[in-house]
Image (cartoon, rainbow, N blue to C red):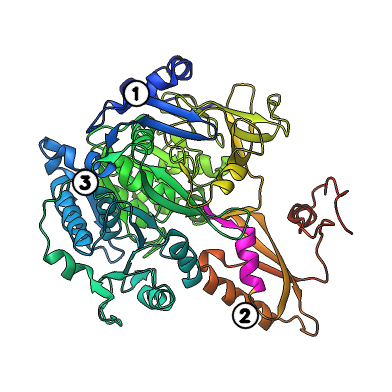
Amino acid sequence: MLINPNPAIVDGAWVKDYEKLYKESVAHPEAFWENIARELYWFKPWKKTLDWNFPYARWFVEGQTNIAYNALERFMKTPIADKQALIWVGQDMTERMFTYRQLNEEVNRFANGLKSLGVRKGDKITIYLPRIPEQFIAMLACLKIGAIHSVVYSGFSAEALKNRLEDAQAKILICSDGYPYGKKFIESKKTVDEVVKDLPKVEKVIVVKRGTGQVNMQAERDLWWHELVAKQDNVCSSAIMEATDPAFILYTSGSTGKPKGVLHAHGGYMVGIYATLKYVFDIKESDIFWSTADAGWITGHSYIIYGPLLNGVTTFVYEGTPDFPDIEIWWKLIDKYKITKFYTAPTAIRALMKFGEDHLKKYDLSSLKILGSVGEPINPEAWMWFFKNIGREKIPIMDTWWQTETGMFMITPIPSLGLKPGSACKPFFGVEAAVVNDHGEEVPANTQGYLIIKKPWPGMLLDVYNNPTRYKETYFEKIPNVYFSGDSAKIDSDGYFWIVGRNDDVIKVSGHRLGSAELESAFVANPKVAEAAVIGKPHEVKGESIKAFIILKHGVAPSDDLKKELVVQVRLQIGPIATPDEIDFVEKLPKTRSGKIMRRVLKAQELGLPVGDTSTLDD
C-alpha cells in the first residue's frame, strides 16, 4: 500500500524531488555535506571534509566550531534572539518559557558556575536529571565550555548510574532532589548519595530543586544549582572546539553486560542533526517541535535540544507521561500550544490505541503539519491509527530509523515521498545503506538480511569511550569494510526499507535498549540464582517484553515469592524499564560446547519458530 504525498505539503517542502537530490548526494557526498555545513557558523573553516581511515571517520578536519554557539549565541544579533527557544510544561501544568536570549543567559550562568568549580575543557560531567529545563541548560553549558557531558536516564537505578559514572570518570554529577513521575515521587538524591559514597573521583554534586528541597546535603561536596547560578555573570564566551573534539558520551546497551559509551563530536554530529531535522520534518521558522523522548536517550540529544535549536525553532517539552494526568494529555497540549511537528514512539501510540478514538474527536489538532515515529519499527496497524486519528489522513508520518551510534536519521521518509505503513522508507541524502548476508553480499528484494551502511556519514560515532577494541568488533568486523548496524531488514522491489528488529542480544522495551547480559547479571546477583538467560518477546504495546529463564542453586525451591523477589532485584539494579514480564524456573539452558547460552534457541522455542542449526549445542 502506497500513500501518496499531500500536494499542499510537497509544495512548500525543502526537497521536492527525492530521487534527484539523493543521486547527487551519494555521487558527491562530501560536496553535499559541505554545502550544509556552510549554513552553520565556524570559527575557522575546515581544510578537509572527510578523513576516512577505516574504521575511523573524522569530519571537517581542522575546522573549529561549537554546537552550543551554533544553537544559541549565533542568533543573538538576529530576530530569533527574542523568539521562544523552549516551552516547558510540568506535569502539574506549570509553565516555564525561555526565549533564545533568556536560554543563552541561563546557559552562560551555569557554564560560569561550572568554571568556578574548576571544570575545564575535556572534563566529564554526568547529568542525572529528569525532563526539566535544567537538563537542557546543563547539556548546553557543558558544550559551551568544552566539557564532555554524559546524560544518564533519570529512571536508571543506583547500579546503572554507578557503572556509567565510573566508566566516564566524571568529575561532577548533576541531579535533582527528586521529581514527580505520574502519581509517584522519585527520590533521586537518595540514589545519588548511595552511589557517590564509593566514587572519590566525583568532586561535586550539583542539586536542582524540583521537589521540597528536604534532602541530605553533604558539606563541601553538595551544592544547590540555584545558589551556584545566583552568583554568576550571564556572559560567557564559547570555547573554540576542533570539529573532531568529543562533545558527549552516551551509554547504550550492547550484547555484553557493560554498556558502551558512544562518543560523538562537535562538528560532524552538529551538521548531521541540523540537516536531517530540517529536511525530514521540513523545519520552518514558525515551527513548534515536540519530541516526546527524554534527553537520557539519543533522540533527546539530537531532536529535543540540539536539532531544533540549531534550526532556530521552538522546542516543546512536557515533563509527564503520555497517560498522566489522563490519556488525553498529549492532544490537549498539541491544541493549547499549537504544536506543528510531533515526534513520538510506537510504544506510546500502541498504548493509547487501547482507549479507542472517541475521546480524540474533542480535539482539533489542526496545527499539526508532520508526524514522526522513533525508537523501534512501527507496525502497520499502529501507523494507520496514528495517520487516521492524529494526522486526520492529511499529514505524513516520518518513520525514522537510526541509532545512538548513528547520531542522526539514516533511513527515513521526507514529506515529498510516498509512504508505506510500517516502512522506514529510503536512505537520507548522502547515506548508502544495503541489506546483506553473512558474506557481505547484497540479498535479493524482500529477503531478510543484515542492515549495513557502506560509507561514513557526519553524525557517526567517533569511537566507544575507552574501548577502541569494542568499537571495531561491534561495528566493523562482522562484515568487512562497512558499518554493521546490528539490525535486520528487508528492501522491497520499490527500494523501500523494512526494519525487522535486532539480530543481537539486545531487547528493545518501549524503544529503550537493554542488553540481555546486563539483565542476566542482575538476576545472577541474587544468591539463590545459579544461571539466567533473558530473551525479548514480541509485545503489542512495548515492542518487546522481557522473559527470563532461571536455574536456581541446589536446594532452593521455586516459588511465586521468589519470582517477586527477583522482579524487585532487577528493578533495583537497572530500573523499572527492565521489569521482567515472565520468569520461568528451569533445570537447564541450551548452551554451546564452550558454555555460551544460546538465547536464539530459547526464543525460537518460546515463539514456536524453527530452532535452526543446533550443531554447536552441547545438548
Q: Quadrant of the N terminus?
A: top right
- Does the magenta-highlighted stretch encompass residue 513? yes
Q: Are marks 3 and 1 in contact (CB under 8 Å)?
A: no
Q: Which residues are magenta?
A: 510-524
| Dot 2 amino acid type | Glu
User: Image point 39% across, 57% down: which residue?
Assistant: 151
- Quick check: 407 left or right of 495? left
Residue 580 screen position, x and y as percent: 62, 67
Residue holding disc 3: 85
Give the mark toward the camera: 2 or 1.
1
Number of numbered discs overlaid on the protein picture: 3
Mark closest to the chain's N terminus, 2 or 1: 1
Q: Nearer the viewer, residue 468 or 9?
A: 468
Label 3, label 1: how far apart the Cα atoms are? 27 Å
State the mark number for residue 34: 1
- In percent of the image, x 20 and y 43: which residue is there? 72
Secondary structure of the residue carrying tag 1 is helix
Q: Position of residue 310 (x, y in %)?
A: 27, 38
Q: Residue 374, position in %: x, y? A: 47, 44
The residue indicated by pointer 2 is 565
The residue sitting at 43% across, 59% down in the picture is: 168
Q: Which mark is residue 497?
A: none
**Mark 2 surroundings: few (<14), some (14-19) or many (≥20) residues within 10 A:** few
Q: Amino acid at mark 3?
A: Ala
Horizontal relation, residue 548 to residue 594: left or right: left
**Residue 483 counted in the magenta span:** no
Residue 588 visible to the viewer: yes
Residue 534 lies in quadrant: bottom right
